[in-house]
Image (cartoon, grey):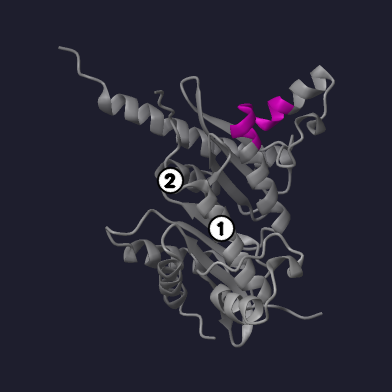
Amino acid sequence: MFTRKSLGLDDAQTALDAILGALSATDSPIALAVADEHGVPVLCLRQDGTPPRMLRRARAKAYTAANLGMDTVVFRDTAVKAASRTLEDWGDPMITALQGGLTIRSGGEVVGGIALSGNPTPRDQALARIGLDAMGITS
Amino acid sequence: MITNLTISLEDAKTAVSAALAAAKPDDGPIAVCVTNENGDPAYLVRQDGASATDVRNAERKAYTAAFIGRDTSAYRLQIAHDGRTVADWSDAMITTLHGGWTLRRGSQVIGGIGVAGSGGEDRDERLALAGAEAAAQLAVDAWRAQRKPRP
């Protein structure tokens, strides 16, 4: 038997509050997904006016970041683009190479993933970073 | 052009909070999901300890209640009465597990709420009802707020 660390709802809500506080008037309404170490959702939120596909994407990004233990932009650049692979190679329809999903680590261990969609993907990632930092989990 | 009512994130949060508040210490940790009228999630919360299955089923219950426009327990009775199975809908998201309630404004479907993980289907249903009632109360409050006082 062994134990694994996993992200809790309190952590997710801390991230949510920080992200909502960081949104500016020029941002589009967002979809946010925070997942545990398997990529299973802990908290999902879709602001009024955000198309449902955005939450689908955010969930896929959070799943990918948690499940692969790699930020989605790093996954895109190193595992997909640089290696000339396509997403089909992973055989998992939830895997995405869209930027905006970040792996959450505690003491080197993957404990979850956080992701946004709704804005240009670099902004999605910047907002996810704000949430990640707010949780105060040290990698 | 037509207009459709749909649930707001604030409504969804109110409903989720009410469902969580109704849970007692001897209930298992739950997942709660609120969707719009099309079954697309607006807010989904998983309490610490609720399983991946609970997350999936909370979402499927909310989806079914919204998309079919029937509370999931009533839907189960109906298809049993009609001699059908869920497979007839060709939709893997459809479930007849109790614990999904349709959210309405008047006769119009505006969303759905689903709860899973409390330990029993019928208890899930009771907790989801607390959320649905809170959402319904918002409609009453909104109606009262815009009602013109009698001269």
Position of residue B67 relative to residue A65, above or below, is above
Residue visible at 75% across and 31% down?
A: B89
Return the x and y of residue A117 as percentages of the image width and height: 48, 60
Q: Report the Cα–Cα distance between label 1 and label 2.
A: 18 Å
Badge 1 crowding class, 10 Å Cα cut-off, few under 14, some 14 to 19, many 20 or more, is many
Residue type at mark 2 is: Leu
Mark 2 = which residue?
B9
Mark 2 element type: helix
What subunit carries mark 2? Answer: B
Please tell me in which quadrant of the rendered image residue B143 appears.
Answer: top left
Residue visible at 75% across and 28% down?
A: B76
Residue situated furthest left in the rendering: B151
Are the residues under marks 1 and 2 on the same chain? Answer: no
Q: Nearer the viewer, mark 1 or mark 2?
A: 1
Q: Can residue B117 be seen from the camera position used here?
A: no
Q: Mark 1 and mark 2 in contact? Answer it, CB < 8 Å.
A: no
Return the x and y of residue B106 as percentages of the image width and height: 46, 21
Which secondary structure is most common in the magenta stretch?
Answer: helix
Please tell me in which quadrant of the rendered image residue B6 appears.
Answer: top left
Relative to the observer, which residue lies in front, B116 or B119? B116
Return the x and y of residue A116 as percentages of the image width and height: 48, 63
Mark 1 element type: helix
Q: Which residues are magenta?
A: B64-75
Residue A6: within the magenta? Answer: no
Residue situated furthest top in the rendering: B151
Tag of residue A57: 1
